Image (tube, rainbow, N blue to C red):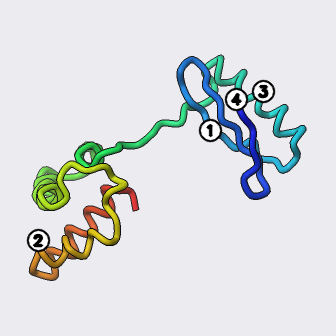
């Protein structure tokens, strides 16, 4: 368990039952932050504090999570179009870590893979949605 100051606010980082928690106690006072950190640890022990869930780490996982969420609220045709567009994205980038997809790699995607301007805009916006931008 640790407590540190980031800017003016304190933050806490602790692990309970194998789950990591990184939370902001919401104060600039060290004594109050220490007290709230202890309260948060107790809440985590009893399961009343939500666990910080990490999102997908690789492009294929992000695409699958995106399509799963879309399937709930969209028609089959929309899903089909999204899968087609995202297959182009996967072919270009491969199954890379999300951190490897940078602004420097996106222009090569737009110019090398897609020629019609409308397809560039659709695939780029689909990729942005998938990555959570």
Mark 2 or mark 1: which comes first in sequence? 1
Q: Residue 38's mark? A: 3
Q: Is residue 132 above or below residue 4?
A: below
Q: Residues within 10 Å of mark 4 (few under 14, many from 20)?
A: few
Tell me how far mark 1 sits from mark 4, CA to CA: 10 Å
Q: Is residue 116 left or right of residue 68?
A: left
Q: Residue at x 12, y 61 (%)?
A: 88
Q: Is residue 33 left or right of residue 107?
A: right
Q: Residues within 10 Å of mark 2 (few under 14, many from 20)?
A: some
Q: Find disc 2 in the rendering and name its residue.
A: 113
Residue 128 seen: yes
Residue 27: x and y, percent?
81, 47
Q: Are marks 4 and 3 in contact (CB under 8 Å)?
A: no
Residue 69 seen: no
Q: Find disc 4 in the rendering and name its residue.
A: 1
Mark 2: secondary structure: helix
Q: Residues within 10 Å of mark 1 (few under 14, many from 20)?
A: some
Tell me how far mark 4 sits from mark 2, CA to CA: 48 Å
């Amino acid at each position: 368990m640790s407590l540190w100051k980031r800017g003016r606010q304190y933050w806490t980082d602790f692990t309970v039952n194998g789950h990591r928690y990184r939370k902001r106690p919401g104060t600039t006072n060290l004594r109050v932050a220490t007290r709230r950190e202890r309260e948060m640890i107790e809440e985590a022990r009893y399961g009343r504090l939500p666990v910080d869930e990490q999102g997908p780490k690789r492009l294929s996982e992000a695409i699958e999570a995106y399509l799963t969420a879309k399937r709930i609220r969209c028609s089959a045709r929309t899903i089909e179009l999204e899968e087609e567009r995202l297959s182009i994205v996967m072919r270009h980038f491969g199954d890379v870590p999300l951190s490897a997809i940078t602004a420097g790699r996106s222009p090569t995607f737009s110019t090398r893979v897609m020629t019609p301007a409308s397809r560039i805009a659709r695939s780029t916006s689909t990729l942005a949605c998938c990555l959570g931008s």
